[in-house]
Amino acid sequence: METFLTALPLVFDPYVLMVIILSGMFGLFMGAVPGLSATMATALLVPVTFFMDPVPALAAIVTATAMAIFAGDLPGALLRIPGTPASAAYTDEAFALTRKGKAELALGTGLAAAVIGGLFGSAVLMFTAPMLAQVAKNFSSYEYFWLACLGLTCAAFISGSDPVKGSISLLLGLLIATIGLDPMSGQARFTFGSVELMGGVSFIPAMIGMFALAEVLRAVTATKPQPVVPQMPIGNVFRGLGGVLAKYKRNLLRGSVIGAAVGALPGAGSDIAAWISYAVSKRFSKEPEKFGTGHIEGLVDAGASNNAALGGTWVPALVFGIPGDSITAIVIGVLYLKGMNPGPTVFLQQPELIYAIFITFFLANLLLLPLGFAAIKGSKQLLRMHRMVLMPVILIFCMVGTFAINNTVFGIGILLVLGLIAYLMEEHGFPIAPAILGLVLGPLLEDAFMTSMIKGNGNLLTFFERPIAAGLGLACILIWTSPLWSRRRRRMAAE
């Protein structure tokens, strides 16, 4: 308690509060512009933090990322273009609600779920960091392989009514993920002699192309009038929210728990947490047929999950110096620059700074409520613009954001090629979400499988020798075989 009281003045200093507010506004802008992700917001803040003390430097990063993750919902709900990868899981659902004239319900629910999930993740970080970090540290390649398989299984739940086309889309994403150098042998694969492709296909240009450019192409090539998005003002986004949160309170808790748990696993992060939560929400929903048509339930789960994962990703970063995602990989570098070597000793040597980070997490998520509300009110201008005016502007932003990732024109090429492929896929009824999921989890799946096979000398039984791996593997096998068992039970009942 004494350490907590010592940390309070460090955070509630006027200069630190000013940094928090300014970085929050910066994070909202970065998240709302497609291509300018939360990771990029963190990277752009690093040079600024050189001139700051540890507390304001880390407070700026915490606040900007929390705001950016939510802000990605704004273009996703209004334009079907996710601002950040964490919003991609439920973009179609949110946009379907907007088409029904329920944009304020979609955005209000996303904001409330993000705040509640963020506060839950902050509590997990503060009270259970050592325990969760210890569990994550015990994960080996075997556990990561089954975790990736479990994540890819989510494609079955987000494929809509045609699981065959969803599976083909997933396989396409996995195929794209294999482009580049083989992680074990270093052999170039599917590069066609291109030096740039040896580094693989970057996820962010691919995501922007497959969502944003495909939407632009659809608007340009449409022979029929585009479905009209109701041009209604975004009024009180909190109207009716109490009933939604009361109805789906279990979803809020489940999404928050999944987000915090997945975030604590190194390399997972908010985007994977959102995919898993959305899939779990559909799997256990009483109305799974409504998903994809503008159903608020999936938004509650995934919206809480992606912000809860933020706190989870800091658990292994602070306690063991293991990055939970790309954002905390940057944070670890900032910690070293500020003389805070991440690891168990930092809790003993500089506990007041660690508790200052905890307090900042709570403050940033509470601040998300007013700042997020202001961002939603400002975003209504997007609905008033004619699509033929808006689409070229979106395309320019996407190309600028893609170029800024690596300062290379090659990323724009990826954007254009995959955008065209995604447009053709959707025109023929193939969903895009499974392909994105394959791109995200493909590298993790391959690396974990190859590493495990080398360690086990090619013996597949080694994937079940460790208790956690055996549990995850058994869960995957049960999920994969559940349709067969269900079909057999229906057949026996019919007889």
Image (cartoon, rainbow, N blue to C red):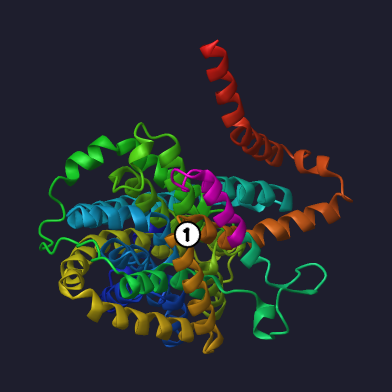
Q: Residue at x 33, y 40 (%)?
A: 290
Does 285 appear above or below 419? above
> What type is the residue that disc 1 sits on?
Ile
Q: In the image, 326: left or right of 9? A: right
Residue at position x 56%, y 24% in the image: 487
| Displayed quadrant of residue 200 | bottom right
Q: Position of residue 276 (x, y in %)?
A: 49, 48
Circle 1 crowding by C-alpha within 10 Å: few under 14, some 14–19, many from 20: many
Q: Residue at 46% across / 48% down in the picture? A: 158
- For label 1, the SS is loop
Q: Position of residue 29 (x, y in %)?
A: 30, 76
Residue at numbered disc 1: 432
Residue 300 point in image, percent of width and height: 32, 47
Q: Identify which residue is drawn at 55% across, 65% down.
A: 349
For the record, the magenta segment spans: 154-173
Is 51 magenta? The answer is no
* Residue 489, quarter of picture: top right
- On whether residue 160 falls in the magenta region, the answer is yes
**Horizontal side of residue 233 vs 167, given as left or right:** left
Identity of the residue furthest to the right in this view: 457
Residue 47 visible (yes or no):
yes
In the picture shown, does residue 20 fall above or below 49? Answer: above
Q: Nearer the viewer, residue 65 or 53?
A: 65
Which is the main secondary structure of the residues drawn in magenta?
Answer: helix
Residue 243 vs 483, above or below: the answer is below
Q: Residue pushed farthest front?
A: 223
Residue 353 visible at all: no
Task: Classify the position of the C terminus by image quarter.
Answer: top right
